[in-house]
Amino acid sequence: MTSIGGIFGVEPGLSAKVSMVTDELDTAQAFRSGDVPVLSSPRLIALCEEATVKALSGRIPEENTSVGIRIQFDHTAGVKIGTQVTAEATLKQVHGKRLTFTVTATDEGGLVGAGVITRVIIDRKSFLSKIK
């Protein structure tokens, strides 16, 4: 694999936003991560990860991809069903193949979650050949 920074255009400052409207399938009850009908932390984190993937879209050659390796996240407010939630990811640091994003999630009331997601660039074929 060639250098990540510059050549692929994977440099600090890349960002992306994604949005969703919550429904019953997104709740803590549905994810079995709690017993209340509000947006689950796993689903909120997945939305933030989706934003990191979108920020890298078209920047990494087909033979490569990125995978999440670390998540540090605070889910700071409950979100009821039917609410639009937007996640934004911004690439803050590139260290070799390691990419560090800051992420935030908001609804109409403000911040509902924030954190850091670290991804690493991998060779797709090599990675999949090791999965058993």
Image (cartoon, helix red, strand yellow):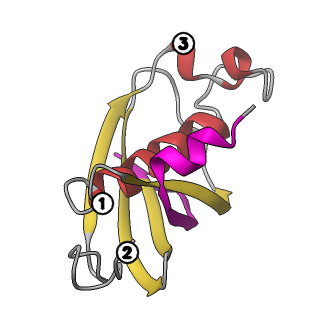
Question: Looking at the picture, how far across and down is residue 82, in whole percent?
Answer: 40, 21
Q: Residue at x 41, y 82 (%)?
A: 92
Question: Looking at the picture, how far across and down is residue 6, in whole percent?
Answer: 23, 85
- Residue identified by numbered label 2: 91
- The residue segment tinted magenta is 106-131
Seen in the image, is 101 located left or right of residue 108?
A: right
Foreground residue, 74 or 83?
Answer: 74
**Magenta span includes 118:** yes
- Residue identified by numbered label 3: 24
Identity, as a three-letter code, of the amino acid under mark 1: Leu
- Residue identified by numbered label 1: 56
The first of marks 2 and 1 along the sequence is 1
Dominant SS of magenta comes to strand
Distance between the alpha carbons at the discs numbered 2 and 1: 9 Å
**Magenta span includes 117:** yes
Identity, as a three-letter code, of the amino acid under mark 3: Glu
